[in-house]
Image: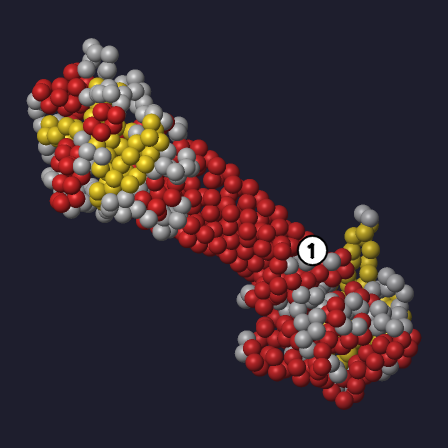
Amino acid sequence: MVPWRLVFAHARAQPLRWALTAGSIALAVFLYCTLQTVLAALDSLASGVSGNRLIASSAVSLFQSLPLSGVERIRAARIDGVREVGHWTWFGGVYRDPKEFFPRFGVDVETMRRQYGDLAPSGEAYLLSADDWDRFARSKGGCVVGRGLADRYALAVGDPLVLEGDIYPGTWQFEIVGVYASDNPTYDEETMFFHWSYLNEGMGRIDLVGTYTIDFAPGADAAAISAAVDDLFRNSSNRTLTQSEAAFQAQFISMWGNVGLLFGFIGASVIFATAVIALNTMLLGVRERVKEIGVLATLGFRRRSLSALFLAESFVICLGGAGLGMLLASALWHGQPLRMATVIFPAFGVPDSTLFVALGIGVGLALLAGVAPAVMASRVSIVRALREG
Amino acid sequence: MADVLIAVRELSRSYERGGQIVRVLDSLSMDVPRGAFIALMGPSGSGKTTLLNLLGGLDRADSGAIVAGGIDIVPLSDDDLARWRASAVGFVFQLYNLLPVLKAIENVELPLQLFGLPRRERRKRAALALDLVGLAHRTDHYPRELSGGQEQRVAIARALVTDPSFVLADEPTGDLDPHSSKEILDLLQHLNTDFGKTIVMVTHSRDAAARAQRIVHLEDGRIAAGGA
């Protein structure tokens, strides 16, 4: 039998100690959930992309540009299985304030439409009406923005959008001609696309692009296509590294090192430290309450009830703290309230599996912090407790 | 022959102190009649509190028997002993031993949790017990908000609320001023004479002992006088 009234009486009597202990657990669980959410988001970057697309980037560095002529070279090679070749170019730049970050890409609109738009045989990544695609294709200085971006800055079709270039210096003026949506969590609604040709002309026809996007027919040999593309540029000054879109996305992740191991180590360290804090608090509680244990035993509470008292307190503190941490993480990472996270990771939210594990951590902490005090409480000599407590 | 509530036979208890075995109770035998009010007196170390602890099942005898209400409590398991304590004994301590985080009525209600009573019934009985000791107006006060005499009266209410067979009091007036001491002794005497409660009280005070029907003197773990 658990004397619950006594459990809550102690919480009432020492709110600061209970709150601080539960708070430290909440913080640890929140951190764990957040780290796992980032990891899950990183995974989703690679998992939600098209399985029929290759990305060719510079073999020297991801930040090294490639010649536009490479697009035609790949097309002209008529590699077996290749269906479409396009290109994307990272613009960088500043909108209003350097802190106001969102991705901006120069693209070839016609091929983008066939690869990611309403004409894509593998399905639409970016949802835009046929009229909007047409208008985008016709408008040289036009751009389309994601729905999230439009909501954030209250942008609408017809509004001007001015960027200060950094990689491509100068002031760049665009007009919004469409607002796209996306029902695929891998593709965000926070990006701006514009005509690469507008950028190229503004820069004096440098004819450089960022990456080649190569779509191939289902069932085609992706490895053979990759090898064939890389062979085309093997003896040039612009060697390519062609890989699946998933592997390309994973390249960003690998740039951060072994993120999973690092996050796992940080999470485990914090939880271990929290477990020690919780255990110390509970043991302190037993030492301070030896007389109370003696009195309860005198009144007829059995040893297992005394154990249950301290175990129950541990569960209330640890599960309360874990619950709070889970709630905080779910609330904070749900509904995309933090723009930076959702710009980088379109599919950002605490996975259910993480919440289950977090709950398990709460139970584990409760047992770890509660069992030793519970055993101690059950072994206290009544006479000694009354005399020395 | 009086109805014997507690029969103590050849009770012995030793402790180890400083590497030496000290025999605190030495083959002690005595009877406590039902409805008696007995004062245990004697010098420090004579075994009074040890005897009280053994009578209440708080400690284990090395040998001998304690038959209380027809049950020999010496061989009982820890759990059975706890159950027996809950129903048969009420304890009153020198330093009251109320739980500071609970209000007066919650302290009194605490032992009733062991009987599976509904909360309303527990609250009702606790209120009655507090009323009996004259503290009906202090139910929602924490121990720190009460005087020493009031705290002891709450402790007595807690001891009585389960309607135990007997009450064991260890120096119940030892920490009180003369006025409060008199009130507590009046209360114990009232419980004995008017409610027939059997009381065994350890005391150093002659005035307190004088309230008892019988005074048992202990010396070196044996009864020196008053055992009959």
Judging from the image, mark 1 belongs to the subunit labelled A
The reply, left or right, for residue A72 in relation to residue A193 is left
Give the quadrant of the N terminus of chain A: bottom right
Please determine whether, in this image, residue A208 is positioned above or below residue B4. above
**Position in image of residue B118 (x %, y %):** 54, 78
**Colour scheme of the picture:** secondary structure
Q: What element carries label 1?
A: helix
The reply, left or right, for residue A157 in relation to residue B75 is left
- Numbered label tally: 1
Q: Nearest the camera: B53 or B123?
A: B123
Give the quadrant of the C terminus of chain A: bottom right
**Position in image of residue B49 (x %, y %):** 80, 66
User: Badge 1 is on which residue?
Assistant: A288
Q: Name the residue located 27 percent from the left edge and 32 percent from the top edge.
A: A105
The reply, left or right, for residue B61 in relation to residue A369 is right
Q: Name the residue located 55 percent from the left edge and 48 percent from the top edge.
A: A24
Q: Nearest the camera: A203 or B18?
A: A203
Q: Based on the displayed image, in which of its 4 quarters is residue B227 positioned?
A: bottom right
Q: What residue type is labelled 1?
A: Glu
**Position in image of residue B36 (x %, y %):** 79, 82
Q: Nearest the camera: B159 or A339?
A: A339
**Position in image of residue A367 (x %, y %):** 52, 51
Q: Name the residue located 39 percent from the left edge and 29 percent from the top edge.
A: A256
Please determine whether, in this image, residue A135 is positioned above or below residue A84. below
Q: Nearest the camera: A231 or A119?
A: A119
